[in-house]
Image (cartoon, rainbow, N blue to C red):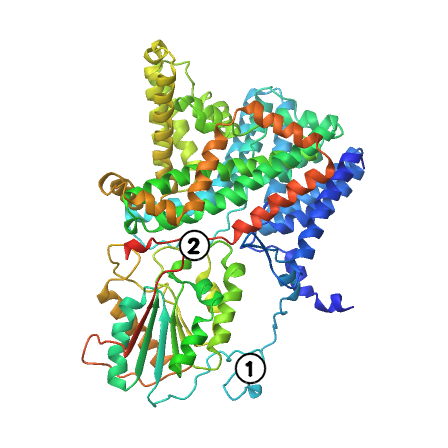
């Protein structure tokens, strides 16, 4: 092997070692306030091996979860008919969804807390403790999330957003929840795949295949279309969701949530 | 032992097996890990031609397998058939036999390409014409099939025309056709340029090796930093044009104009650079195309190996400019329409090709008049602006998923344009704007400066090269997870 080849090889190897070592560094780096991103070697090595064997259903915990923390496929909790405090969080899509959900809640005796964080994403929620704070403030016993519309085009999303999504799910903890997927107006780069992988069995409503009438911006469903969207979600909650609650069909089209909290878009 | 326990062997094995969603690309970390293993072996056996060729072929086929699965066998079969046909053409003295052999080779190569790339396109068009309920076929398009098909066609045609001698050794030809740097996205290197280098098998010089690394780095910068980052906003805007103002869409069109250049030329740079490291010169494929002062010049600078392929194997055989002006324009249109369709199986690509064909014809018609205009800074600026504007406008059809989307983009640019959005746009997407400005500025850096920088890099100490390389990869990491603001708040 001639000398320049050795030099090039050593250079590539040194760079690889540099980034590998950096990725295992326990604390992140910041230079001039800018976070220095690291390669994914550490994540790849530390990733939990995927279990291919189906887990036994007799090993379910008190919340109906397998040792891997997920519900078995098709698992459903019994219908909970008690009145709930529902925390509904998400992005601007809530503008259309929440008023319709509020009508269902009024009819069924639930209290709805609506939290719109404009232009937010799993990244915004995962980087902050906002969800934990909301839980402390409102003590919800049911959580609904509608997020993902601002992440349709994020490159390499499964790597980029998985940690933040996991953090959000950890914050939700054992509270029954439903995650409403984004109403795709174009093919996404993997947000729906990521959500269906990470969100528990029976807790994810895939909206991507639904048909919507869009408002002038071409992205948000019209109010009427958003109401029908919510109706489809409720129908799914009544028939297939892992955590069904009482949701009676209201005579009113819309109502107002007991509390509405609005956050400005992330900077 | 702990490390062994931590390794998931199934996951490790999956790295080496075909995964439709994760083709092996020069921008993937796994490719560079493989290249680290490849390089010392290659360098050690480079002087032994047979060993080197066997090793590179094995690596190339694995590279192809990783991206296209068992379709790599298709490439092996194509290479064998065309090698044999070329041998037959060369040995036969009978003109009819030679013609039949050439026709068989062309039909076979093109039918495979047509089947994989255009079956669903043809079926969907048939469906809209005659009605019915055609279901699209679940076809995997073998990666790079358009590129290696064009390379193998040029080889057989050149042998038929007596421009080159066929390769006696099948292994030589398999090496040429499967050569991994050119496999995914070109350049469409010709056998007559490549085979002599393979025969000579000269050792790679220091200039070639580090010059190659320089090109690879430029390619990574263009593709993984610039193109991938600015693509995010372009995707959002083209995905939902009604949600954006004319100004924002104009920025997306400019963004896409730069994105596609950085994407195509970046990947070409990486291929040419890798090849240079291996001791093979592939020439250049993009020569500052957006500096062009007319559309003819643009096509001499854009994707040069494809342009010249279309010229040599479509335009000239059709008659070129030898059969009068009307026929020349017809030939140009056919060539550009086919060029458009080659880029993708959709009518939007055909319109893109047609647009360029018309522009080329108009330029040819006006050339005698244009040549009389004095070349001043003003006239050159006007020429540049017109050429750039036309090229950028036609990229709308290339990028749009349908004519409906293209129409929305164009109509909003002309009917909903307000400069008032500029300050907000600059504030919210300043990184994106900065990148666009940098790409634009870099495009106009004189060639001698680039050459000087390359020579400085080659002669710089090893540690300096390492630092530059690390800084570049860090840039890739920084921007890989950076996102562009999807919506401006003012729109809510």
**Residue B385 versus residue A97 in the image, above or below:** above
Q: Is residue A13 shown above or below B309?
A: below
Residue in the picture at 56% in, 88% down? A58
Q: Residue at x 33, y 47 (%)?
A: B424
Mark-to-mark CA distance, 2 and 1: 33 Å
* Among the two numbered marks 2 and 1 on one chain, the one whose residue lies closer to the N terminus: 1
User: In x, y percent, where is residue A232?
Assistant: 30, 73
**Image position, residue A38 (x, y; %):** 61, 55
User: Percent position (x, y) of residue B106?
Assistant: 52, 32
Q: Which mark is residue A66?
A: 1
Q: Say above or below: B276 vs A145.
A: above
Circle count: 2
Q: Where is the C terminus of chain A found, in terms of image quarters?
A: bottom left
Q: Is residue B383 left or right of residue B144?
A: left
Kindly identify which numbered label has been placed on residue A153. Answer: 2
- Residue B170 vs residue B45: left or right? left
Q: Secondary structure at mark 1?
A: loop
| SS class, disc 2 | loop
Crowdedness near tag 2: few (<14), some (14–19) or many (≥20) residues, C-alpha within 10 Å:
many
Relative depth, front residue between A35 and B229: A35
Any part of residue B73 in sight: no
User: Do pointers 2 and 1 mark residues of a single chain?
Assistant: yes
């Amino acid at each position: 092997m001639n000398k320049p080849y050795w030099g090039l090889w050593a250079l590539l190897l040194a760079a690889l070692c540099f980034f590998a070592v950096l990725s295992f560094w326990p604390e992140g780096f910041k230079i001039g306030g800018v976070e220095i991103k690291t390669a994914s070697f550490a994540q790849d090595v530390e990733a939990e091996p995927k279990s291919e064997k189906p887990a036994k259903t007799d090993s379910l915990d008190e919340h109906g979860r397998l040792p891997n923390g997920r519900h078995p496929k098709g698992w459903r909790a019994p219908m909970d008919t008690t009145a709930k405090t529902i925390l509904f969080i998400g992005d601007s899509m809530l503008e259309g969804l929440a008023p319709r959900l509020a009508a269902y809640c009024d009819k069924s005796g639930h209290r709805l807390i609506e939290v719109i964080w404009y232009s937010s994403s799993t990244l915004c929620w995962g980087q902050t403790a906002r969800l934990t704070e909301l839980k402390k403030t409102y003590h919800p016993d049911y959580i609904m999330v509608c997020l993902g519309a601002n992440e349709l085009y994020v490159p390499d999303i499964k790597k980029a957003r998985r940690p933040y999504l996991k953090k959000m799910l950890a914050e939700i903890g054992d509270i029954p929840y439903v995650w409403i997927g984004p109403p795709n107006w174009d093919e996404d780069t993997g947000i729906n795949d990521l959500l269906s992988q990470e969100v528990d069995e029976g807790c994810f409503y895939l909206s991507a295949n639904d048909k919507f009438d869009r408002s002038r911006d071409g992205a948000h469903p019209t109010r009427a279309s958003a109401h029908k969207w919510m109706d489809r979600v409720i129908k799914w909650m009544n028939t297939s969701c892992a955590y069904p609650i009482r949701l009676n069909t209201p005579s009113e089209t819309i109502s107002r949530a007991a509390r509405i909290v609005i956050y400005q878009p992330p900077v | 032992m702990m490390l062994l326990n931590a390794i998931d062997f199934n996951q490790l094995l999956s790295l080496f097996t075909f995964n439709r969603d994760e083709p092996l690309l020069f921008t993937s970390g796994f490719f560079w890990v493989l290249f680290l293993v490849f390089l010392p072996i290659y360098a050690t056996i480079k002087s032994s031609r047979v060993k080197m060729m066997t090793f590179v072929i094995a690596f190339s086929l694995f590279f192809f397998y990783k991206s296209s699965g068992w379709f790599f066998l298709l490439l092996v079969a194509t290479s064998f058939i065309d090698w044999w046909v070329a041998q037959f053409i060369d040995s036969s003295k009978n003109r009819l036999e030679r013609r039949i052999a050439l026709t068989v080779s062309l039909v076979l190569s093109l039918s495979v390409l047509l089947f994989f790339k255009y079956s669903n396109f043809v079926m969907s068009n048939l469906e809209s014409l005659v009605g019915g309920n055609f279901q699209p076929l679940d076809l995997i398009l073998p990666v790079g099939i358009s590129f290696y098909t064009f390379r193998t066609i040029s080889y057989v045609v050149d042998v038929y025309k007596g421009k080159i001698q066929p390769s006696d050794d099948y292994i030589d030809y398999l090496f040429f056709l499967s050569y991994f740097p050119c496999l995914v996205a070109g350049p469409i290197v010709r056998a007559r340029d490549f085979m002599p280098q393979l025969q000579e098998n000269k050792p790679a010089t220091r200039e070639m090796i580090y010059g190659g690394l320089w090109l690879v780095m430029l390619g990574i910068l263009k593709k993984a930093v610039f193109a991938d980052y600015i693509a995010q906003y372009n995707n959002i805007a083209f995905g939902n044009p009604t949600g954006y103002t004319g100004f924002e869409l104009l920025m997306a069109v400019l963004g896409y104009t730069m994105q596609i250049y950085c994407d195509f030329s970046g990947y070409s740079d990486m291929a040419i650079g890798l090849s240079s490291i291996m001791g093979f010169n592939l020439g250049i494929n993009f020569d500052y195309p957006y500096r062009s002062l007319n559309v003819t010049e643009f096509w001499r600078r854009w994707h040069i190996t494809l342009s010249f392929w279309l010229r040599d194997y479509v335009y000239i055989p059709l008659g070129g400019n030898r059969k009068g002006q009307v026929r020349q324009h017809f030939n140009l249109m056919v060539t550009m329409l086919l060029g458009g369709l080659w880029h993708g199986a959709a009518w939007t690509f055909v319109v893109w090709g047609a647009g360029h064909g018309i522009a080329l014809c108009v330029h040819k018609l006006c050339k005698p008049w244009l040549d009389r205009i004095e070349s001043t800074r003003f006239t050159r600026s006007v020429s540049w602006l017109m050429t750039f504007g036309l090229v950028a406008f036609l990229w709308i059809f290339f990028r749009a998923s349908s004519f409906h989307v293209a129409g929305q983009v164009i109509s909003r640019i002309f009917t909903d344009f307000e400069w008032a959005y500029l300050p907000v746009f600059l504030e919210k997407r300043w990184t994106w704007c900065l990148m666009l400005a940098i790409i634009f500025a870099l495009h106009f850096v004189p060639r001698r400066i680039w050459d000087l920088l390359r020579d400085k890099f080659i002669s710089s100490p090893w540690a300096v090269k390492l630092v530059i390389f690390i800084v570049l990869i860090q840039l890739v990491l920084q921007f890989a997870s950076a996102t562009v603001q999807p919506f401006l708040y003012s729109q809510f």
